[in-house]
Image: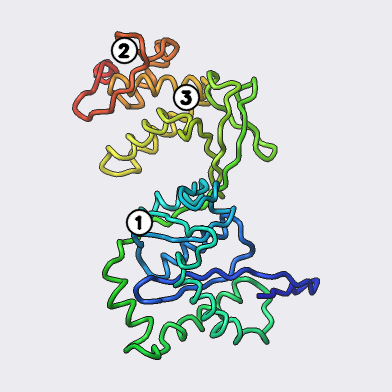
Amino acid sequence: MPLVDALTGEIRRAQVFVAVLGASNYTYACATPQQTAADWVGAIIAALEFINGVLRLLVPDQPRALIANPDAYEPMTARLMQEMGEHYGVAVLPARPGRPQDEAKVEVGVQVVERWILARLRHRRFFSLGELNVAIAGLLVELNQRPFKKLPGCRASAFEALDAPALKSLPPQPMVLAQFKPARVNIDYHVAYEGHYYSVPHQHVGAAVELRVTATTLEVLLRRQRIGAATAAVVRWQMEHRPHPEQGYRACLELMRLARQYGQERLEAACARAQSIRAPHYRSVKSIRECGLDRQGSTTPGGTTASMPVHDNVRGPGYYSHH
């Protein structure tokens, strides 16, 4: 669909995404700026919110933006698509290339949307994606309520009877779209992104990492694991083990002060040791830092790094040293 720039008069073409449910033919459509991974996944998320539930199986096409390794038998989905599947708990089975029978429902759905929605909008001028999507949404309601020609009811009534009862609930929070970018840790143990520099533990100098970037957060992933997980675990403990989350704020602010005073590296090491002795309290972290125990690392008798779970009933020496 054409979109007109109100200032320049330039015309660009929005892409139209279509999804169809297998049993009822209930149809969703929306316009996206392009066909990037974010456009595709964002539209899929919007479709799930439209039906107010989660399917057991999603059968997308195999565009390069979604499928890292297009293959008829073992396609590998791209990272953002993988995250979407994990967040919503939906299996993804891309249609095989050149096999339209794998997605026959949506092939027909595309024709229906072209005929009953896009054709009716062809003489209107749209100046923004939002304006176009409002128009599509209005006609979508009408499309789903059109009576079937050979069956009783319509798409909307078939959806309520067949598909809706089989849907899983949506997760409490919608997925936050992220972009991924490869990076390498510089000799100063920082990674660069758009003119800004982010520090990671020094032992990862030279390592190939992956940046996961959202509108508000940048995460550095090493073998798909966040770097700095120990500090995050201690912060989470402060927030989850208080009668009110606000009571954990002060401890978290003190942890931030320690990071500014001694550096993020040593704070992470102290938090890791606090976890290993099952005492993930701010006071334990502070005591470990003051005694220099963070420089010794956290090891088991066999000499390997300890990774013991935090247990509420085992407080450890850091706790008793302050009582």
Residue 150 in the image: state x and y as whole percent. Answer: 37, 90
Mark with earlier residue (3, 1): 1
Q: SS for tag 3?
A: helix
Say which residue label 1 marks: 172
Q: Is residue 45 rendered to the left or right of residue 172?
A: right
Vertical comparison of 115 with 217: above or below: below
From the image, state whether disc 2 or disc 1 is nearer to you: 2
Disc 2 crowd, CA 10 A, few/some/many (<14, 14-19, 20+): few
| Residue shown at 46% from the left, 47% from the top | 74
Residue kind at label 2, given as amino acid type: Thr
Say which residue label 2 marks: 300
From the image, state whether disc 2 or disc 3 is nearer to you: 2
| Residue shown at 80% from the left, 71% from the top | 8
Q: Is residue 152 rendered to the left or right of residue 225?
A: left
Task: Give the Cα separation between the discs numbered 2 and 1.
Answer: 39 Å
| Residue shown at 34% from the left, 39% from the top | 239
Disc 1 crowd, CA 10 A, few/some/many (<14, 14-19, 20+): few
Residue 208 in the image: state x and y as whole percent. Answer: 58, 28
Q: Which residue occupies the extreme left position in the image?
A: 313
| Of 39 and 255, the residue lying toward us | 39
Residue 258 is marked as 3
Residue 255 lies in quadrant: top left
Q: SS for tag 2?
A: loop
Tag 2 near tag 1, CB within 8 Å = no
Q: SS for tag 1?
A: loop
Residue 246 in the image: state x and y as whole percent. Answer: 35, 43
Residue kind at label 3, given as amino acid type: Leu
Residue 204 is marked as none
Task: Give the Cα separation between the discs numbered 3 and 1.
Answer: 33 Å
Tag 3 near tag 1, CB within 8 Å = no
Residue kind at label 1, given as amino acid type: Pro
